[in-house]
DNA sequence: GTCCTCCTGCTTTTT
DNA sequence: GCAGGAGGAC
């Protein structure tokens, strides 16, 4: 039909509207392998979504196209933007490697011997299982050993190491065996197993699109290869400078290998940045130029230089957070809060920002951190629900049976485990047959537990997930999931309510969904869905910020040891850290606010810090060195070094002795003159204090005992509670409180002004 | 045998 | 400043 053709042409014209020539070429090159090397902010997502729409416009049904991303957030955004172009479609395959895999395994898993009811073990479950195995083998199994073992096994699975040594290979074999016995699949397993569907995969789609291709691991690459049909219609988009996941097997070399793997690949480079100001691009480019291993792109922008990047030194994290929040308040009238983000290296950095934002009553959105679904009380509840779906999961059995306590302890569980092993049954199957032997007390508790799980099992495919949760909570008495420790219970109760709410919301979208559907959803979910108020500041790690952009970006904590992050005894992957810094800076459209503190609290200790080497790699003419506004000075901060702080590294002493003189000279020139050494809290004072480290610390933190004499171990008297012993002291000034235990009662937290020392 | 508390030992980053 | 584990109290 000629009329139809015309429509298609018109649509296509709209799709390439406003694109530059390489972008246009990428959108129009539908057939054959295509690799788009796209610099930061070069319109990558735009190209990808329009290209997808263009394929649809050319007459391909959406369900024959699959778009793969790495994060849920990226998938959500892609879906949203595709819908804007082609309207709402339910038959679109857009998702992360993991979610697409889970979906396929539910559909076709039986063909490779996987039961439909498999559960997904997340990183925590994996750790728990490995810990259990190490313990069983009488190997050391503290957090460090578990982590090390997991990382070796994962490297082996990803063929990043060829060989396992010593007990590792036995542990690995046993781990895989247990997973299978529990009818469980872990994250890597999802990808591995999907790749086994080699008969089915190539028939499912005609077009494959991949975002953030530089983060592809070997296993994922294998999966992709299997997904591409004979026509070779695969398009990958990536940027080697933004490869920040090597620790989980990503290898930007696949960007090179791609052309060999798919002969006839067309390569398109997108080098014009549309996102950021000239200063931001210059700074980011200069920084990344320090990396040796990169393909080398020249990112450029037609935009104005814009305002310089701002850099500020603060004394402590508290100051850093408070002054950043003040800046947010100033900018608020011109820039919506949703256009501001604080991006940090590690999740632990979020805390002071949360506190200051709450104090200033600015709404914020925290992405990541202790993930919601990793909280103890949530995992407790989930273990029951997962057990109801898949009774073979011993891990869930062991977790569920312990909460609430029902008189079944380690000894009984060991007995059960031994019997289960002997009979080659799962723990549940053993109990369900009723042929187990335990003490009378344990038997009673077990009977209780069995009947509860049976009832859940009966309802699991019938009633909605949230109703099942209610049933569980009723039967176990909600308090069973709250580990009686006072204040915290409130938060835990709220979390369970939150869980219930999320189930209800899920049911609105998918009224026919049963628990299994919901469980898949949560296992693969990070908590980036928690949006509290539309207009809020975003707090997240740089890793989770990849692919996003904001008008104003705050980058705190640019200190050696933190960023680049250096972990004891582990080698510093400097180039990847630098790529991370590059990603961080390029998230900003207009303003970048870099900062560092002179001291930082680590593991509860005040540590002296030194400027990040990345700061020295930024060109001076893009940066404005700021001193913090006066407000900073009023805080009762003094040089915390006198409070026993240690530096990250030995060797370097005072700033001016470092080889980064140029930077430091600039930094110091912005400090207020140290006119009065007694002026507490000014950077000048800090500098002066640095010269005479013995300066006193009347309200200092930890090691030095404060002048008021209240400290852990001291005996005190309270007018009402009588005599007790201080367990810990927190806070300063009027808010200084002591945790005191009076006799057998749980400790109370009391303002020190109500206490007298004995 | 079970439960609870203190205390150690430690924290990248994500699916 | 947290979680989880070992060892003590019941």
Image: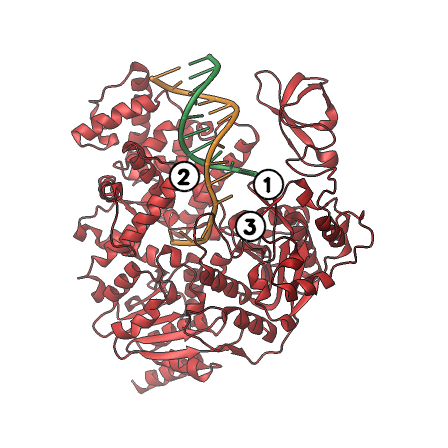
Chain colours: A red, B orange, C green
Task: Using the numbered discs, state the Cα–Cα distance from disc 2 to disc 1 in whole angstroms.
Answer: 21 Å
Q: Residue at (67%, 38%) from the top-left corner?
A: A701
Name the spot of residue A243 as percent of width and height, x first.
Answer: 42, 64
Please tell me which of labels 2 and 1 falls first in the chain: 2
Name the spot of residue A648 as percent of width and height, x first.
Answer: 56, 49
User: Horizontally, is A543 left or right of A129 in the view?
Assistant: right
Same chain for the residues under marks 3 and 1 in the image: yes
Same chain for the residues under marks 2 and 1 in the image: yes
User: Which mark's residue is nearer the viewer, 2 or 1?
Assistant: 1
**Residue underneath mark 2:** A143
Seen in the picture, residue A437 relative to A305 is either above or below; the reply is above
Q: Residue at (72%, 50%) from the top-left corner?
A: A691
- Quadrant (top left, top right, bottom left, bottom right) of the C terminus of chain A: top right
Residue sticking out furthest to the bottom: A2
Taking the image as drawn, is residue A646 in sight? yes
Label 2 with label 1: CB-CB less than 8 Å: no
SS class of the residue under badge 3? loop
Name the spot of residue A45 as percent of width and height, x first.
Answer: 44, 70
Please tell me which of labels 3 and 2 falls first in the chain: 2
Query: Which quadrant of the structure image shows residue A601?
Result: top right
Query: Which quadrant of the structure image shows residue A281?
Result: bottom right
User: Horizontally, is A241 left or right of A121 in the view?
Assistant: right
Q: A302 and A660: which one is in front?
A: A660
Label 3 with label 2: CB-CB less than 8 Å: no
| Numbered tag placed on residue A605 in the rendering | 1
């Amino acid at each position: 039909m000629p009329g139809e053709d015309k429509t298609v042409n018109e649509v296509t014209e709209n799709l390439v509207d406003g694109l530059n020539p390489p972008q246009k070429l990428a959108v129009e090159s539908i057939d054959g392998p295509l690799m788009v090397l796209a610099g930061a902010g070069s319109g990558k997502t735009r190209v990808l979504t329009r290209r997808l729409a263009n394929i649809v416009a050319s007459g391909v049904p959406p369900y024959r196209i699959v778009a793969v991303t790495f994060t849920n957030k990226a998938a959500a955004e892609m879906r949203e933007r595709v819908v804007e172009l082609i309207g709402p479609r339910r038959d679109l395959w857009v998702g992360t490697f993991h979610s697409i895999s889970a979906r396929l395994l539910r559909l076709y898993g039986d063909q490779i011997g996987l039961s439909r009811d498999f559960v997904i073990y997340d990183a925590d479950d994996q750790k728990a299982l490995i810990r259990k195995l190490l313990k069983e083998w009488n190997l050391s199994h503290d957090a460090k050993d578990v982590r090390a073992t997991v990382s070796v096994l994962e490297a082996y699975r990803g063929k990043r190491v060829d060989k396992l040594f010593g007990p590792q290979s036995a542990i690995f074999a046993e781990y895989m065996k247990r997973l299978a016995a529990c009818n469980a699949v872990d994250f890597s397993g999802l990808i591995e197993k999907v790749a086994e569907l080699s008969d089915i995969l190539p028939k499912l789609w005609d077009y494959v699109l991949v975002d953030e291709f530089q983060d592809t691991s070997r296993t994922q690459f294998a999966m992709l290869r299997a997904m591409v049909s004979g026509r070779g219609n695969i398009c990958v988009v990536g940027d080697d400078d933004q490869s920040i996941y090597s620790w989980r097997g990503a290898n930007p070399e696949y960007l090179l290998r791609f052309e060999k793997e798919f002969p006839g690949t067309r390569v398109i480079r997108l080098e014009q940045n549309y996102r950021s100001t000239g200063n931001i691009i210059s700074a980011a480019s200069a920084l990344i130029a320090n990396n040796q291993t990169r393909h080398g792109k020249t990112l450029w922008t037609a935009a104005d230089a814009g305002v310089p990047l701002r850099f500020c030194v603060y004394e402590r994290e508290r100051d850093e957070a408070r002054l950043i929040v003040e800046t947010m308040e100033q900018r608020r009238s011109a820039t919506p809060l949703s256009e501001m983000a604080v991006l940090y290296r590690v999740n632990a950095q979020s805390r002071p920002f949360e506190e200051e934002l709450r104090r200033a009553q600015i709404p914020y959105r925290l992405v990541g951190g202790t993930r919601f679904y990793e909280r103890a009380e949530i995992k407790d509840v989930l273990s029951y629900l997962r057990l109801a779906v898949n009774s073979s999961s011993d891990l869930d059995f062991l977790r569920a049976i312990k909460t609430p306590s029902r008189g079944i302890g380690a000894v009984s569980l060991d007995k059960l485990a031994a019997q289960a092993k002997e009979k080659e049954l799962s723990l549940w199957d053993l109990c369900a047959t009723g042929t187990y032997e335990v003490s009378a007390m344990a038997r009673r508790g077990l009977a209780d537990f069995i009947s509860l799980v049976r009832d859940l099992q009966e309802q699991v495919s019938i009633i909605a997930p949230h109703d099942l949760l209610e049933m569980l909570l009723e039967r176990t008495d909600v308090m069973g999931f709250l580990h009686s420790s006072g204040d915290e219970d409130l938060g835990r109760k709220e979390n369970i309510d939150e869980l219930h709410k999320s189930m209800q919301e899920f049911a609105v979208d998918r009224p026919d969904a049963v628990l299994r559907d919901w469980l898949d959803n949560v296992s693969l979910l990070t908590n980036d869905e928690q949006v509290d108020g539309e207009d809020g500041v975003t707090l997240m790690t740089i890793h989770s910020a990849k692919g996003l952009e904001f008008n104003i970006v705050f980058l705190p904590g640019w200190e050696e040891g933190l960023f680049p992050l250096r972990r004891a005894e582990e080698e510093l992957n400097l180039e990847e850290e630098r790529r991370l810094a590059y990603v961080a800076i390029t998230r900003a459209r207009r303003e970048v606010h870099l900062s560092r503190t002179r001291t930082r609290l680590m593991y509860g200790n005040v540590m002296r810090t030194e400027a990040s080497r990345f700061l020295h790699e930024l060109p001076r003419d893009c940066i404005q060195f700021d001193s913090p506004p006066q407000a900073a000075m009023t805080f009762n901060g003094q040089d915390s070094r006198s409070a026993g702080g240690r530096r990250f590294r030995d060797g370097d002493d005072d700033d001016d002795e470092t080889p980064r003189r140029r930077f430091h000279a600039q930094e110091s020139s912005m400090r207020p003159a140290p006119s009065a050494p007694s002026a507490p809290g000014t950077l000048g004072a800090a500098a002066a204090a640095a010269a005479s480290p013995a300066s006193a610390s009347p309200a200092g933190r930890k090691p030095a005992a404060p002048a008021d004499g209240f400290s852990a171990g001291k005996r005190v008297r309270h007018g009402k509670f009588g005599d007790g012993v201080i367990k810990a002291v927190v806070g300063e000034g009027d808010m200084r409180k002591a945790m005191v235990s009076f006799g057998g009662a749980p400790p109370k937290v009391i303002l020190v002004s109500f206490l007298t020392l004995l």
